[in-house]
Image (spheres, rainbow, N blue to C red):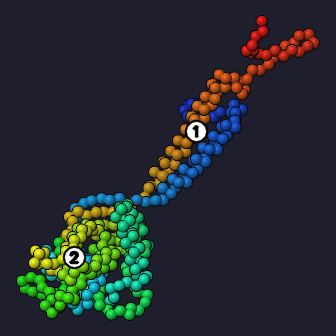
Amino acid sequence: MRRLNKKKALNFVKELDAFPKVPESYVETTASGGTVSVLAFTAMALLAFFEFFVYRDTWMKYEYEVDKDFTSKLRINIDITVAMRCQFVGADVLDLAETMVASDGLLYEPVVFDLSPQQRIWHRTLLLIQNRLREEHSLQDVLFKNVMKGAPTALPPREDDPTQPLNSCRIHGHLYVNKVAGNFHITVGKAIPHPRGHAHLAALVSHETYNFSHRIDHLSFGEEIPGILNPLDGTEKVSADHNQMFQYFITIVPTKLQTYKLSADTHQYSVTERERVINHAAGSHGVSGIFMKYDISSLMVKVTEQHMPLWQFLVRLCGIVGGIFSTTGMLHGLVGSCVDVVCCRFKLGVYKPKTMSGFDGHMNSLTPLLSENTEH
C-alpha cells in the first residue's frame, strides 16, 4: 500500500515537471543554431565579466539629519603663509559670543613667500585638481572612497636652501572653538585681551609694511583626513595695495564619513570670497587683513559607502543568462521562419525545383516536377 502511494506521488510530481526532456534522437543540430549559441555564450561571458566589476564597485549614499551636537568643540586646521614678518601679524578667533579664543595652538614660522620649483609644480597641480572638482562634483565621491591612501595634500618642504631673506610668516597649527559662528582673522599686530572687546597692537607697525598677500596651503574643520581636498586649499592672493582686506565667508556642514576604510567625524564647507581696498576717504571702511567668517549649518550630512549585496549580484547574473538565452532563441526562430518564407516564395536553396524519375519499359526519363514553360 505504501509503495502504491509512493508511486502515485512520484507520478504526480513527474506531471508537474516544467522542464520535459526531449530524446536526443528527436533533436536536430544545425550550423545556424550552433553559430547563434556561440554568440549567445560569448555575450553571456562578457556581460557576466563586466557585471562582476559592477559588483566590486561601491557608491556613496548621502543622508541628511539635524545636528544635535552643540556641546563639542570645533577644530580648525590652519596652514597660511602671509607676506609679512611674524612680529607684525597676529591671528586669533572671535566667536559670536564675543569670546576670544587663545591662539596657543598656532605656530609662527619665518619663511620665504615665493615657492621653490618643486613646490610651484605641486601648487599648480593642486589648482588643476581644484578646478576639476568645481566642474565635476562627482569626483568628490572618488576622494571619499580613496581617503587614507591618496597623496598628501600638505605643501611639501623646500628642496633648496633659500637665499632670500625670511620676510614672510607661515601660521600653522589648529584651534578648538565653540560650535557657534565666529571670525578667524589675521591682521596687523598681536592680539591683546581687552575688557570691552577685541584689539590688536598695531600702533607700532608702519603702514608701508602692510602686505596681506597670502597663500592658503590648508584650511579645514574637524578631524583632519589625509587625501581630502578642501575648497580653499591652494588659494593664493596677491595684494595690490597696502591697505587691503580679504574676506572669506564660509558655511560649515558637519559630516559623518563612513567608508570601508575609516569612520570619521569631519566637516565640509562652501566659501565665497571678497576683497577690497580700505580707503576711508572713499567710504570703504574696515581693517586691513585676512578675515574668515564662518557659520555652522544646523544640518548634518551622513556619507556612507555602500556595496551591492551578493543576492542582487546573483539575481542580475540570472537575468543576464536567462535574458540572452530567451532573446537569442526567439531571434533565431524568427529569422529561420523569415528565411523559410522567402525561400519558399522565390524557390531558392532547398526549395529549387526537383526532378522525379518515371519508369517506361527499360528506359528511365527525367520529368520535371514543376514546369514554368509548358509547350503546347
Which residue is tagged 2? 246
Q: Is residue 96 left or right of residue 228?
A: left
Q: Secondary structure at mark 2?
A: strand
Task: Characterize the local packing of mark 2: few (<14), some (14-19) or many (20 or more) Cα atoms within 10 angstroms.
Answer: many
Which residue is tagged 1? 328
* Residue 36 horizontal/vertical position (percent): 63, 40
Q: Amino acid at mark 1?
A: Thr
Closer to viewer: mark 2 or mark 1: 2
Q: Secondary structure at mark 1?
A: helix
Count of numbered badges drawn on the protein: 2
**Residue at x 37% of width, y 72% of height:** 127
**Residue at x 77% of width, y 6% of height:** 376
Image quadrant in which you'd find residue 3: top right
Image quadrant in which you'd find residue 278: bottom left
Q: CA distance from mark 2 to mark 1?
A: 67 Å
Q: Nearer the viewer, residue 286 or 322?
A: 286
Image quadrant in which you'd find residue 63: bottom left
Q: Amino acid at mark 2?
A: Phe
* Residue 298 horizontal/vertical position (percent): 20, 64
Tell me if I can see residue 90 in this picture. Answer: no
Q: Nearer the viewer, residue 175 or 353?
A: 353
